Image (spheres, rainbow, N blue to C red):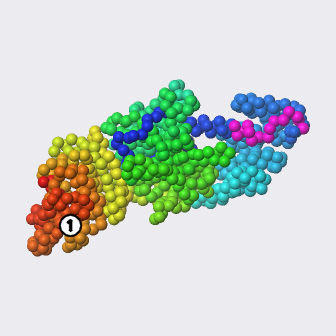
């Protein structure tokens, strides 16, 4: 499994509808990094080898013909003329079986060109002749053996490199390599279930496809495709494409998102579960701009676009403190709509790029706070990439080469602990992880399916997108969703509304979203096995209130909801379905606080509004007792409002007992509906 360096995840976004972020433009991520990686590898190749000397006495041979052939091949290598370099260096090596320099160069060249067997053969000859002459050759040999599944050989050469090499960074690589060889040998003996299935021709093409995103209902797939484009500085560029699931379960023909895509790169996108927001990465081009001379914060920044009906808004730069002069990429928004995870790359020792996972949170004022680096159970001195915070808000998936693994980048998961820290990273195991680089894993909302990119045999060409069933131990908490539509109760017109769900047990915001201003539709993800209070509100309207129990069963169907809001006018009513009292008492339970504070806010925003608070009971018990209880409960709500700054002359409390049922009193469900608190606009 291989992939490039960006990521695409599954979140619910919670961002300002009218953003104040500065606008910027262009150039994506993974192609940029792929080119950069090749340039850096070529530079490494030329810098690490012992310097070519003019005097033959400095070489490991005295054969003048061999030296001449070597110098000719080395010059071709410098000019990246591979055929010429290979020919000269192979002849130089053949001329003297103990001539080390051409063998080092050949090993580097084969490694750079993705020819591991040939590279290992050259490094093995270097080690056989004189392992102390160029210690990095032993380390490279060990790393290649690890990637090829030769674990015993790799461990032997890592141990040799540890003793031979005095460079502290390479010595540390050798120590880590020994741990990886031990881990990989054990993992191969205990493989995890893994049966990937190609997503088909509607999604995959002869071009590379990667970084998949799916909506919570598994109906819409967004991904990045690398396409040829003569207008681009690199001759290729990345664009976003979207595919919709057809009635037969297949993925339909993917279409580009034309209002977001540009001639430059768009990559590393995170699509919200309702498919209405994209947060993604743009990287500056060779001229240091994002296209048309627009400057960004750094080499790569995070941008956002919102879908309104079928139209996407112009992407906007998220700005500071999220974006900096460093490299920000691979975003993943939490389902609470307030936490954004992403990758930030900073320059470390020797100019090496350190890539770590950061998190920032949206404040009440609508701005992101200063990002914080995740702890050492997740981040390492190595590279972390492709972060996904699952909609359960508790499970993090990411790629890393810093934890014990198969070699290269492996995929890991970490679970949030009770104190909010992240637990020890768990390697997803073999054959999900291999000796190559694995990243850009996406786990669906229900936790059963995982998507990834791979160039394995049998695909449509280069990287294709695949799906597989994730084994139970690696799954997140079960998540369901509520899908609905917000309309004006009188006219049926779709409304843009603020939809919030709070956990009834703790009163904390669980997730939030905005309904689409064109269609009124919304979708929010919720972990299963909990009770939630839902509030939907729009300016000029009374808010909507309801509560739900999202059952734990994996077979439970998602909820569909019709939310009809009433305008704030005389006679308008709200059923406060999230006001709770102790049994046979008028004492308010703590779970009522969120709803009551919502009512306080509504009253303060509409200073001329007067209301009646009506208490209602079921028909269990004596009528007189029910009447008294309903009056007491109405007055308890009135008292709360007054304690929070609402004048008493704006609130009338009235008890109705069991005289105005809205459902039958013959069932538990009906009686529960009849036990209610209503607000009527006077």
Q: In this rendering, would 90 be left or right of 373? A: right
* Quarter of the view holding residue 186: bottom right
Rendering coords of residue 352 (x, y %):
64, 45
Between residues 197 and 391, which one lies in front from this camera angle? 391
The answer to whether residue 15 is above or below residue 584 is above
- State the extent of the magenta-drawn residues as a range: 43-57
* Quarter of the view holding residue 666: bottom left
Between residues 367 and 162, which one lies in front from this camera angle? 367
Exactly how many numbered labels are in the figure?
A: 1
Residue at (51%, 33%) from the top-left corner? 295
Rendering coords of residue 5 (x, y %):
55, 43
Residue on which disc 1 sits: 636
Residue at (70%, 43%) from the top-left corner? 117
Rendering coords of residue 441 (x, y %):
50, 49
Residue at (27%, 58%) from the top-left corner? 597
The answer to whether residue 283 is above or below residue 678 is above
């Amino acid at each position: 499994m291989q992939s490039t360096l960006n990521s695409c995840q599954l979140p619910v976004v919670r961002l300002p509808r009218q953003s104040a972020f500065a606008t910027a433009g262009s150039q994506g991520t993974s192609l940029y990094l792929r080119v950069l990686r090749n340039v850096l590898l070529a530079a490494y190749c030329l810098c690490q080898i012992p310097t070519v000397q003019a005097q033959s006495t400095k070489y490991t041979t005295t054969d003048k013909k061999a030296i001449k052939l070597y110098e000719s091949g080395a010059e071709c290598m410098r000019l990246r003329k591979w055929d010429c370099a290979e020919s000269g260096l192979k002849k130089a090596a053949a001329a003297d079986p103990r001539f080390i320099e051409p063998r080092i160069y050949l090993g580097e060249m084969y490694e750079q060109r993705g020819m591991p067997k040939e590279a290992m053969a050259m490094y093995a000859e270097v080690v056989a002749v004189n392992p102390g002459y160029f210690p990095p050759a032993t380390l490279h040999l060990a790393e290649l053996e690890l990637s090829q599944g030769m674990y015993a050989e790799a461990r032997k050469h890592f141990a040799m490199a540890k003793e031979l090499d005095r460079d502290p960074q390479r010595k540390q690589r050798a120590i880590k390599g020994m741990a990886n060889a031990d881990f990989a040998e054990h993992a191969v003996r205990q493989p995890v279930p893994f049966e990937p299935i190609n997503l088909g021709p509607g999604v995959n093409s002869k071009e590379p496809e990667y970084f998949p995103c799916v909506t919570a209902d598994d109906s819409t797939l967004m991904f990045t495709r690398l396409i040829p484009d003569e207008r681009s500085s690199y001759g290729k560029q990345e664009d976003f494409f979207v595919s919709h699931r057809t009635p037969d379960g297949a993925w339909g023909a993917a279409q580009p998102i034309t209002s977001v895509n540009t001639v430059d790169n768009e990559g590393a996108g995170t699509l919200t579960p309702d498919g209405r927001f994209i947060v993604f990465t743009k990287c500056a081009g060779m001229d240091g701009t994002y296209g048309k001379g627009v400057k960004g914060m750094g080499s790569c920044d995070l941008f956002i676009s919102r879908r309104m009906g079928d139209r996407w808004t112009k992407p906007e730069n998220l700005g500071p403190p999220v974006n900096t002069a460093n490299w920000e990429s691979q975003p993943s928004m939490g389902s609470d709509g307030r936490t954004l995870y992403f990758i930030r790359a900073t320059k470390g020792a020797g100019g090496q790029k350190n890539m770590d996972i950061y998190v920032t949170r949206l404040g009440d004022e609508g701005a992101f706070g200063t990002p914080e680096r995740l702890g050492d159970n997740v981040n390492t001195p190595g590279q972390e990439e492709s972060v996904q915070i699952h909609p359960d808000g508790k499970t993090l998936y990411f790629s890393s080469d810093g934890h014990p693994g198969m070699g290269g980048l492996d995929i890991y998961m970490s679970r949030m602990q009770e104190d909010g820290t992240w637990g020890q990273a768990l390697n997803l195991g073999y054959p999900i992880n291999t000796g190559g680089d694995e990243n850009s894993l996406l786990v669906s909302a229900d936790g059963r399916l995982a998507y990834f990119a791979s160039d394995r045999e049998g695909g449509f060409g280069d990287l294709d997108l695949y799906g597989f069933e994730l084994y139970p131990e690696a799954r997140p908490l079960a998540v369901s969703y509520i899908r609905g539509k917000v309309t004006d109760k009188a006219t049926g017109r779709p409304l843009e509304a603020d939809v919030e769900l709070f956990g009834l047990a703790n009163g904390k915001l669980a997730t939030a979203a905005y309904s689409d201003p064109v269609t009124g539709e919304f979708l929010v993800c919720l972990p299963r096995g909990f009770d939630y209070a839902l509030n939907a509100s729009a300016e000029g309207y009374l808010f909507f209130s309801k509560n739900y129990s999202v059952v734990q069963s994996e077979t439970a169907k998602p909820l569909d909801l019709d939310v009809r809001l009433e305008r704030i006018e005389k006679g308008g009513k709200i059923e406060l379905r999230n006001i709770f009292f102790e049994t046979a008492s008028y004492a308010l339970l703590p779970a009522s606080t969120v709803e009551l504070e919502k009512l306080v806010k509504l009253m303060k925003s509409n200073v001329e509004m007067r209301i009646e608070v009506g208490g209602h009971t079921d028909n269990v018990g004596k009528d007189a007792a029910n009447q008294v209880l309903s009056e007491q409960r109405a007055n308890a709500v009135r008292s709360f409002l007054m304690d929070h700054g609402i004048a008493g002359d704006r609130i009338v409390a009235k008890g109705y007992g069991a005289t105005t049922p809205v459902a039958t009193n013959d069932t538990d469900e009906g009686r529960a509906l009849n036990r209610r608190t209503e607000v009527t606009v006077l």
